[in-house]
Image: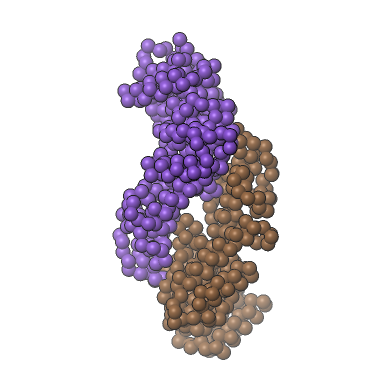
Chain colours: A brown, B purple
């Protein structure tokens, strides 16, 4: 029987699924950060190798030489052509002769939620991106421009607003918010209100010093604070603005004749509060198709692997893939 | 006669004025970046030394040993106590025995525009800060929290909005604006609209790559583009939002019984379009005192030097200082 590998190589972690051509997942393995652009080719190859090794370990009866195709979903399209170069030695060392094929990570995320060839994807984690998918390919991408040029409503964006709200209150110019003590506690800053030579509190001076010492993207770590106190008006305002931005992003790629489905992924967009509000907002914007929430792009990497091998992924194949992948993950 | 040095040590350049105790400026000299926190103590000491040398060269009859006091206006209050340590060797090498005294740069900016002991200062260049001054000291500081935590309406803020407006249009989601070709031209990006693998134009991909390669603060260099086309609605909206932020910052430090004066400095706030609108907005907010525009904090460093030496700076002394400093600058 034909065997395939579908791999979801992300900036946080990497997952690999070993599949048969009827959509049965035989094993799932995990590795570290797997993006060659942000993490380096050597680290990415190692992470992907570790994930493949883990997947193969769950199906010891499958010889690696039987694997006919390796499909890797990852961000950074320009590295696509080169995967054969930086990843092939790792595959050969594992006994796999097939050439790796790279697919967009957002397409895999979309295909993790539906076997339909057309629809929309929204991913909001540290960054935020929406895609329109047609005929099984990415037709249009919106945002995903990073924290400095875009990514409204993303984890960075929310964390940034949280930090600014705390700084504004400490500077005596913003409304009182429970975000302020929460930020100070997370950064281990004493809530010292002794003014310094400029009439600024010691806590604010310390916040400024700490924030500029770290990489700006680290502000995304403050995003969960926005969800901590549902009664805080400032936090609620930040979440509401994030929801508006994310729903707007989906509607920006929407076409009148294509009602969905919409697949939603990423740590921010799948938060219950955000998810429900985004769904309500895109419904109000005229999007009537089903909405699916996904954890990552692993199932979709499997869908793409099957399709690239010439297998038509119909509803029953898709459900088999989802169920067996979930079972293998939990083994 | 008593001789004094007033020095305005900034993150871009440094200026020194040699004064007599009646407020006559005998010479002005210039040096490079003079902030010990951002530029390092050695570089700051060298810049300040060069500025002093230039000022002394305009008044060869004054022996350096006659200089009774050295007052340095600069940002970063915490380095104040240490100036005696890192700057003294430079002063001694120039034949100056007096100890350096550090004053807040914003106080010197304020005192460059008025001899009054009470009022407000607004500085908006790369960053933005407002101060309330009472009894000749900084009573309250607002913002100046840097590009990540504050500085709304600053040069960075405007440049950031310009970059985002261009990215939004190139991403197919924002209104057409003449900012887009202007940004591409400044960054020497071809306006290539060929879509890449994600349906994104080559110009946008290049913009993203370039912006993240540089330090974020470099976006301040795009701020002048917002002023280039007065008919562009997007640019006008950015300037309007900046004006609202800057006027709001002044009103945040305003007290009902203290109508001014307001002293305005910095490359953004002194732009005619910004200045006039900010003045109109603070007038509408109830601030009735006079408004003065200043180029830098050199005159104010002189005012502070005179005051620290026990000289009362009245209106005639102040005007003498302004006129003779201007004359010495132009020599």
* Residue at point 66%, 52% (across, down): A177
Could you tell me residue B146's position as x and y percent? 52, 45
Front-most of A281 and B198? A281
Q: Quadrant of the C terminus of chain A?
A: bottom right
Could you tell me residue B130's position as x and y percent? 52, 39
Q: Is residue B207 left or right of residue A157?
A: left
* Residue at point 38%, 22% (across, down): B323
Could you tell me residue B246's position as x and y percent? 48, 44
Q: Residue furthest top?
A: B1
- Number of numbered discs: 0
Up-down relation of residue A256 to residue B34 (above or below) = below
Up-down relation of residue A94 to residue B32 (above or below) = below
Q: Is residue B331 left or right of residue A206?
A: left
Task: Inspect this view and state whether residue A99 appears.
Answer: no
Q: Is residue B58 left or right of residue A156?
A: left
Front-most of A18 and B222? B222
* Residue at point 39%, 67% (across, down): B172
Q: Is residue B294 left or right of residue A247?
A: left
* Residue at point 41%, 58% (across, down): B165
Could you tell me residue B202's position as x and y percent? 35, 64
Task: Inspect this view and state whether residue A152 appears.
Answer: yes
Up-down relation of residue A204 to residue A322 (above or below) = above
């Amino acid at each position: 029987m034909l065997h395939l590998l579908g791999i979801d190589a992300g900036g946080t972690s990497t997952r690999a699924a070993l599949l048969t051509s009827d959509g049965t997942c035989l094993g799932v393995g995990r590795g570290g950060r797997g993006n060659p652009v942000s993490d380096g080719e050597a680290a990415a190859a190692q992470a992907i190798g570790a994930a493949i090794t883990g997947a193969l370990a769950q199906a010891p009866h499958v010889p690696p030489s039987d694997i006919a195709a390796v499909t890797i979903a990852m961000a950074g399209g320009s590295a696509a052509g080169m995967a054969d170069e930086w990843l092939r030695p790792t595959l050969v060392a594992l006994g796999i002769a097939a050439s790796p094929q790279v697919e967009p990570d957002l397409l895999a995320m979309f295909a993790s939620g539906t076997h339909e060839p057309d629809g929309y994807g929204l991913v909001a984690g540290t960054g935020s991106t929406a895609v329109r998918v047609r005929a099984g390919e990415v037709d249009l991408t919106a945002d995903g421009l990073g924290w400095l040029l875009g990514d409204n409503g993303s984890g960075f964006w929310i964390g940034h607003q949280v930090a600014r709200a705390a700084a504004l209150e400490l500077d005596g110019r913003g409304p009182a918010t429970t975000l302020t003590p929460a930020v100070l506690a997370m950064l281990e800053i004493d809530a010292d209100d002794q003014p310094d030579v400029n009439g600024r509190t010691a806590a604010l001076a310390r916040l400024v010093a700490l924030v500029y010492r770290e990489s700006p993207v680290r502000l995304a770590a403050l995003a969960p604070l926005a969800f901590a106190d549902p009664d805080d008006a400032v936090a609620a305002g930040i979440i509401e603005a994030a929801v508006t931005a994310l729903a707007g992003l989906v509607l920006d790629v929407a076409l009148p004749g294509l009602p969905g489905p919409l697949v939603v992924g990423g740590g921010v967009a799948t938060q219950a509060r955000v998810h429900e509000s985004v769904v309500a907002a895109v419904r109000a914007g005229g999007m009537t198709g089903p909405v699916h929430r996904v954890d990552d792009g692993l199932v979709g990497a499997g869908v793409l692997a099957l399709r690239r091998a010439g297998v038509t992924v119909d509803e029953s194949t898709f459900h088999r893939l989802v169920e067996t992948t979930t079972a293998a993950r939990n083994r």
